Image (spheres, rainbow, N blue to C red):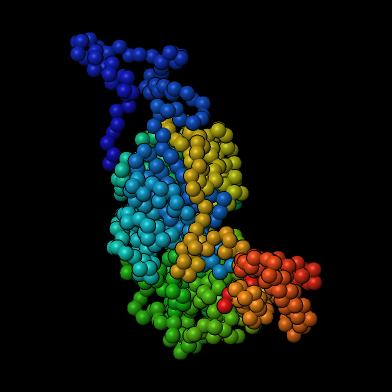
Amino acid sequence: MPKKKNNTTPAENVSAESAKKRGRPAKKQEAPAAKKTEKKKGERQTHVRNPKNGAPRKNEKSVKVVSLGGLGEIGKNMTLLEFEDDIIIIDCGIGFPEEDMPGVDLVIPNFAYLEENRSKVRGVLLTHGHEDHIGGIPYLLRHFNIPIYGTALTIGIIKGKLKEHRMPFTPQLNVVSAGDTVHLGVFAAEFIHVNHSIADACALAINTPSGIIVHTGDFKIDVSPIEGEMINLARFGELGKKGVTLMLCESTNAERPGFTPSEKSVGGTLEELFTANEGKRIIISTFSSNVHRVQQIIDVSLRHGRRIALSGRSMQNVVSAAIELGYMSPPAGAIIDVTEAKHYAPGDITIISTGSQGEPMSALYRMAFGDHRDITLGANDVVIFSSSTIPGNEKLIGRIINELSHNGIKVIHDSVQLGLHASGHACAEEIKLLYQLVKPKFYMPIHGEYRHLAANRNIASFLGAPAENIFVGELGQVLSVSRHRAAFTDTVSAGRTLVDGYGVGDVGGAVLRDRLHLSEDGILIVFASVDLTTRYIVNPPEIVTKGFVYVPDAEDLLYEARIRASEILSDMLDRSKKPNLEAIKERIRRELSKLMMNETGRNPMIVPFITDL
């Protein structure tokens, strides 16, 4: 546990020491501007130098709080706490690529600020094992050999992920339990048990030179959890009594009134669906990390005499880790290999699959489009989506549902059946309850798009928090926090890094613009060869086009383009001019672009390949 600090100021310490040497009691000095107030019996008197909010003064010790992900967006959650020579990292997640990122696989935080302060980084604290909180760890470890701290299931999932990445060293993975405290530099972080849609989730209470900072992670208040205890509200209350300087609170469901339903409520809906579909093969798609949901699906399947097959690499990895660590305990033989599923009668098998967000090439996607190696769907199948839709994935999910429906397969999702999913995130009343227990001096909504952050801000304001004590920030903004003051004081490098295949960060704005250009108007390539010395066209221009026009219907246009390119070459190779290969290419690109726009109203990418033989 961190040592209890002396609350006296340096001036008071010097004054006390001088008085001791003189043999007289120290005279207590009063601040010049402080008004004398009558102290009630049993009341602790405190003096605040300036109760108004604002940037910490130069002589005040302040902790910097920086979000590199999770503000104004869903996913890639990552927060830094920095004090002088120490930086700790809370979570390091991934995000889904947006529609304007063709070909991109993942989005991770920008690590530039950490690279600039490499010597200060002390370690990573993980709140839970969801991809939007741990998915970026393998990419972070490529740059930093730093210790990682998380609960057993969280670390177990990371171990499975790291097997797929070739690490240049053995990562420092440390398992902790709720109630443990980790010391990293000047910071002492306590893990606090919370309820979420994955086991072993924790909030963090971090002792800093500026006081206690509480980071909620993702949480809900579930009074009837599937396994384990409900959220440790008592500990949050104890922290509130001690005094919390800053609370960083997740905002995902802040717009929703009331309380989030218990995960146990999903079990009744599943029971009804299995009873109503006896004799049919049931395929259920859910988040692979939702161990409690998967356990409920297994339990209801066994009650109905069904075996269970797992489809999708992440589903198999997470369930294997959960079974190994004791978070799931299916009977021997209950889970079979997916390759054996075709040997069972439809009413004797349940398939639990990835793909609940419509991810291309996920297991459910391949089933829907007839591309799964082991499972072919038909009229005796029922597909159930036991999940919520992450904002931005509506079209992807709709595409799968439409394809399944077109093929005559029954589909059940949350729009037609209530109770298929229970969120793992706190709604407004739960946020209010936790806020009232913690009673933070300063409040910062995190984890959500701006509308979620704004809704969370409004909750704190409704509960009486002064507007100047609530901070809705953006990526890279530095919130400087002392015990009595807080303000945004600076910005650091932040943003996103795109992962495409094995490439990390090599796809930037220019590449994305080219990809979007190609996807919208196609490409037209001009091939020709010249001899700049003799100023002779060796091979006249030929044109190849893809994604621009249907060649048999555009022969006249392409012929005109070849003639125009030949005229440009002849003019640029004229004896009176100095031939320049790059200038030739640029003129061909510019004039053919005008031609195509005038004739078709389209702007294909023009790529001249002109070689000097």
* Quadrant of image for the C terminus: bottom right
Q: Nearer the viewer, residue 365 or 292?
A: 365
The residue that appears at 67% across and 80% down in the rendered structure is 540
What count of labels does the image hold?
A: 0
Q: Nearer the viewer, residue 160 or 532?
A: 532
Q: Residue furthest bottom?
A: 343
Q: Is residue 13 left or right of residue 582?
A: left
Q: Is residue 145 left or right of residue 48?
A: left
Q: Position of residue 491 (x, y in %)?
A: 50, 42
Q: Quadrant of residue 586?
A: bottom right
The residue that appears at 49% across and 85% down in the rendered structure is 373
Q: Is residue 588 left or right of residue 380?
A: right
The residue that appears at 52% across and 83% down in the rendered structure is 372
* Quadrant of image for the N terminus: top left
Q: Nearer the viewer, residue 587 or 123?
A: 587
Q: Position of residue 328 (x, y in %)?
A: 37, 68
Asked whether the viewer can see residue 123, the reply is yes
Q: Position of residue 263 (x, y in %)?
A: 49, 61
72 vs 396: above or below: above
Asked whether the viewer can see residue 130, the reply is no
472 vs 301: above or below: above
Q: Position of residue 278 (x, y in %)?
A: 54, 81
The residue that appears at 32% across and 40% down in the rendered structure is 186
